[in-house]
Structures are given as C-alpha cells and as structure tokens.
Image: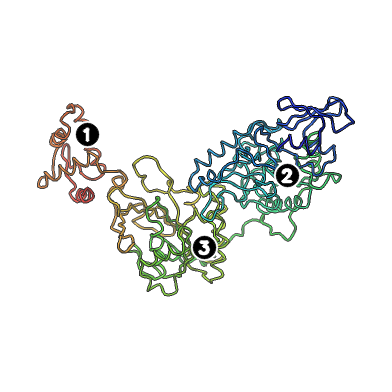
Amino acid sequence: MDYQHIFEHSVGIQKIKYKGTQGLGCCPLHDDNNPSFSFNIENGLWQCFSGCGSGNLYQLAERLNMGNPRQYITGLIIDSNNYTNVDYTPKNTLKKENRDTIEVDEMDKLDSLKNKYKNQVKDLSKWIPKWKHKYLGIDDYGTTVFIYPKAIKHHKSKDGKKPPWWEGIKDKNDKVIGSHCQIFAEECIEQYDKDKPLYIVEGEKDWAICNLQCVTFSSGAGSVPDDLNVLYEFGSIIIVYDNDKAGSKGAKKVAEKIKTESPDTVVKIAQWDKSLPEGYDIIDDSQKENIFDELDKAIVNANEYELTDSKPDNTKGYPIMNIHKIKETSTKPPEAIVQNLLVDNGVTLISGTDGVGKTWFGLQMAVAIASGEPFLGWKVNKKPVLMIQFELSESQLGYRLQQFDTTKTDDNFHCTAMQNDDLIFSDAWVKIANTIIENDLHNSVVIVDNLYTSTHRDVSANHDLKPLLKRIDEIRKNTGCSFVLIAHHNKHEGDKEPILGKNIITGGKTLTNYVSNVFQIGISSMGADIRRGKITKMRDAYSDLLNEPLRLRWNVESCTFEYEGTIMNESLHCEQIKGKWEYKVLIEFSERNTDEPVFDRQKIQLFIEGHFPDDSPSTNSKKTTRWLNKMEEYNLIKKTKYNKYELEVEAIKLLKEFDK
C-alpha cells in the first residue's frame, strides 16, 4: 500500500514537509494553520500534536468518514518496501518466468519461495503471537500471503479486484496442488489445550490477530473441509464468523457438520451485538481502542447449536444378534475372484516401488478378471471390471491395452481415463460412485490406479486417510463392488532395496488394516526383467505362499508378468551385486571347482588372497569370514559340517546369468 499517495491525495494533507519517511503537515481533523500532523509513509501511523489523537490509517479514515475505511487496513503485516497502488507497477514484481519455474515435484523451490515471502515481512502487529509468524508473509506486490503445507495463498489478487489466489506446484490442468479447502496451520492444534474451547474464525487474518486458541479454513465462510476429525478432541467449539449473512450461514454449516459427525461436542455460534455494522469482524474489533471488547461480548452471548429432529440419531447403541442366528445367516466365506489376491466385495491393495510396473500389473489383472483367464497361474472367477485410470491419458491407456488379448473379455471390461477437465489430486470418489451407479456396474471389480492421485488428501496422514477409507467403504457396501487399489511404497535411502512388508507401504497400518488382501511388488538386483512379489495379507483364506517372496518375470513381448516360483533368499535380490568382490570371487571360485563343489576355509582363503595380494594375512582372514557368512546367509553356499562347505550350484547359475 502506497501510504505517501494516500496521505497526500486521499486524505489531502496540506503544507507537507518530509524528513526521511516522516511527514509533517496540517491536521485534517481540525482547523490547522500551523502544521501539527505527523505521519509515517512507511507504516501509515499518524499523530496530531494539537490533541486530536493518534492511530493507524484505518482509524483516521473512519474519523474522517472516508468511503470504505476497511480498504486501508494493511493487515496485520507491514512491509516497508512493497506497498503498491493500482497506479504503478512495483519494480520488484515477480517475473512470470520465475513463477513458471515452480513445477510439479519441485517442493524445494516452493519452500524457497515461502521463505522469501516470510523474509520480506518487515514488521508485524504486536498482537500477533511469535509462533504464528512462520505462517505469514509478504509477496512482491505487498500483499499478505498465508503459508500452507503445499501451496501459498495470496490474500488478494494482484490487481486488488479478484478474490484470494493460490501459488504453488500445478498439476497438468494448471490447478495449484494443495489449494483445496483445508484447515489453516493445522499442525498447531496439537499444542492447544483440549480442555479449553476451540474457536473457529472466518479467515486467516482473523486467526493471526486473535488471541484465542483458534483455527480457520482456507476457502471462506461458505466452505468446510471434508475432514474435521482433528477438531473433535475438543469438548467445546465456538464459531466466530463475520457479522453478515454469509457469516451466519457459514457458521451454521460448520456447526451442522460438527454436530452430525461428533454429537457429543458442544458447538456454539458467537452472536455479535446488533448495534454493530454489517460485516463487522475480528479485524474491525482489533482496531478499536478497547480491543476485542465486542469479540468478548459475542462469545459470552454465543448460542448453542443443536441438530433438528430430522437428523439421524447416531448415538444409539449397536443392534445385537444371537450367535445361532449369525451362524445360520453366514454359511460360507466370501468367494475368491482371484485366487490368493481378491475376494468378492473385498478390497485388495497392490503396492509397489516406483517404476516397478504397477499400472501394467493392474491392467493384466483387469483383463484376466474380465475374461476369466488365470492370473499369474492362479484361478480367476469371471467378473465385470471397471478400471479408473488417473495415471494415463486415454491415448496412453489405449496404446497399452493394444498389447493385451482382450477377445475373451466380451463386454466385461470398462475403462475411464483422465479427461481434460479432470483434476488429479482432487477428490474423485464421488465421481467414481456415480460412474458405478450410472453404468449399472454393481457387484463388479473396480480397479483404481492409483489411490494417491484419486484424492487431494495426504494418504500418508492418518487424519486424511481415515475419512477417505470411510468413503471407499460406503461405496463398497452400497454397490457390492470389489476394489483393487494401486498404491505406493515409501521412498527409502541407500543402495539396498527394503524387504517387502506392509511396513513400507505409504499409508501404514491405517491403510493395510482396512484392506482384505495386500500384494507387494519390488525390483530385483537379479535383472532388469526380474521382480519380487509377495502376498503380505490375506483375509478369509490361507495360502502357503503368504509372506513368501515370489519371483516374477516381466515379459517384454507380451507386456505381462509371469510367476516363476518362490525366491530362496529375498535379501540377495535387494542388494546391488554387480561389481561386488564377494560375488566375483564366488563365480570365479565355482567355475574353477565345477567338479569339486565341497571346500573348506583354507581353500577359499587362499583363493581370496590371490585376489587381494597386497592385503595383510589378518585382513584376508577377516574377508574370508565375511565372505563365508554372507554367502551362507544368501543360500549361495551351505555348511555341511565343521569347516566344510558346499557350493549351491543352481543358485550360482542364476547369478552367472545376471552377471553376463
């Protein structure tokens, strides 16, 4: 905001003289011939030495009855270099090419931009607690910005005429990821006293200036985040929205959602004094001499919100059944659709490392189920299939499907891929439910590729994942469908791949406890076309293959995975073996002893010393011990008795093939 322009032209100060950023002129509040009005063009503060008072620009505009004095609220943040008006363009405007550098997956650049905006703040209102400072910033247009986990919200548009706008990483449809309706500064709630009331205020500026333990939402009074579970730890919640129709309507909307989902929570709506003007809010109250007096009154006069009788009563106890009746009505377990992998009306999770071929795996499974053909050699019961594909465009999906024989699928296989007006990282599950219903695909198999891009929620966070799983379960129950969800493994550090287990799946126990079956896929160091597979969860069935590492081969010609049996030692497939001296010694030693696979420690140590002639006897002895332990652990040799070992010829042959 250009304070100099406002004081000179909007307020009309006369006989101005400047000394640095401090101006002195005739006071507009009284008949002043001898300049007594001091004002600062850096922060907008003023004082009349003749006794008219002092304050900020908002208070001056209100006393002079200037039109819309709220436009002169600088916010809460004062920046000496970046205030602007619509009459000129600031020299430090962020260039478009700089903004364009922030692309998908460039979180480090977004973090740098956040820090830049934070560092551009020169001063803060004394009423804002220090712990809130990290959520506030100033952009290159002098506008207040609010720091969200995956995006930056600007309080106003660049020209001051449009609603708040978002900046951050964009998806391919040019929508900012992380700009959905959400709780602002949600992580702060953990530090709040759960025995005291929680306050919900209408905007980020209200949140910043308010001295109560409060939260706000990112999309204004008319919007409510899907997931408010984190708020239900508080026994009492008080909603303080603006004194206007939108605020009243929005407060009731929030109260209804809270009471519906958490009936035991006491919800109240603050009542502003009727004498206050339309639109009065917490910011207005912070500008008064008796700061927050009206806010305190509004809270004291808050009305408790109760649901109408038409709302369902979710507080009743559970219906009980006699065990004999249960036994009579439940005579058989769910039918398997894919042996070992998927049961009727169940949910299966297919999780894997990046680049392992999860999408191909899902397509192969879809074709097998729709045609009734075996999958990885396992029996399949034919079912209609709906594949929801968020990873591929329609042309990409069509190209991949050309690689499969779909002649036996009849009319059982249905697909939908990303359209131009679809957004990844938006909540697609309402649309998925409608697709099932509109196309009469009840009791079919729905394959979603993938879970991460099907929603704006953070599937690694329990508070985001739980409501998503609740919605999936409602769709499952209402449609009778079985679901296959494609998911991801957490990223790992180091050269060694992790052993396949549920603990490495993004979403953790919350996700894996919910689903019926889990199948995981990982890469293998034994070749570019080799994969590790593992069934890590089965419900309502059992197989000897449960938790056994499986060897899968990727057939480049057919674009399918082939099951080649179990893996003797999964650890061997997790370690990068090319160039490792241990394996080089093993292969050369086995080639020289094809007729004599049995050996002792002395023989292998002499062989190792030949590879490391410059090492001391002590060092080579340690290397021999290490070699024997490692090769035995990986089932490449076996110990037959004391100081007697035998080469595992077949396992070594596989190593040789990969080494070639």
Q: Residues within 10 Å of mark 2 (few under 14, many from 20)?
A: many
Q: At 22% from the left edge and 34% from the top edge, which residue is drawn?
A: 625
C-alpha gap between disc 3 and disc 1: 60 Å
Task: Say the numbered circle drawn on residue 26.
Answer: none
In front here: 454 or 512? Answer: 454
Q: Identify the element where label 1 is drawn.
A: helix
Residue type at mark 2 is Ile
C-alpha gap between disc 2 and disc 3: 42 Å
Task: Say the numbered circle drawn on residue 238.
Answer: 2
Residue 288: x %, y % from top left: 80, 35
**Sequence-wise, which precedes: disc 3 or disc 1?**
3
Q: Image quadrant of residue 427?
A: bottom right
Q: Residues within 10 Å of mark 1 (few under 14, many from 20)?
A: few
Residue at numbered disc 1: 625
Tell how many labels: 3
Q: Identify the element where label 2 is drawn.
A: strand
User: Which is more foreground, mark 3 or mark 1?
Assistant: 3
Q: Residue furthest right?
A: 31
Residue 84: x %, y % from top left: 68, 39
On screen, residue 630 versus residue 593, left or right, reads right
Residue type at mark 1 is Thr
Residue 48: x %, y % from top left: 83, 27
Q: At 29% from the left edge and 43% from the top edge, which residue is drawn?
A: 576
In front here: 259 or 115? Answer: 115
Residue type at mark 3 is Gln
Residue at numbered disc 3: 419
User: Which is more foreground, mark 2 or mark 3?
Assistant: 3
**Sequence-wise, which precedes: disc 2 or disc 1?**
2
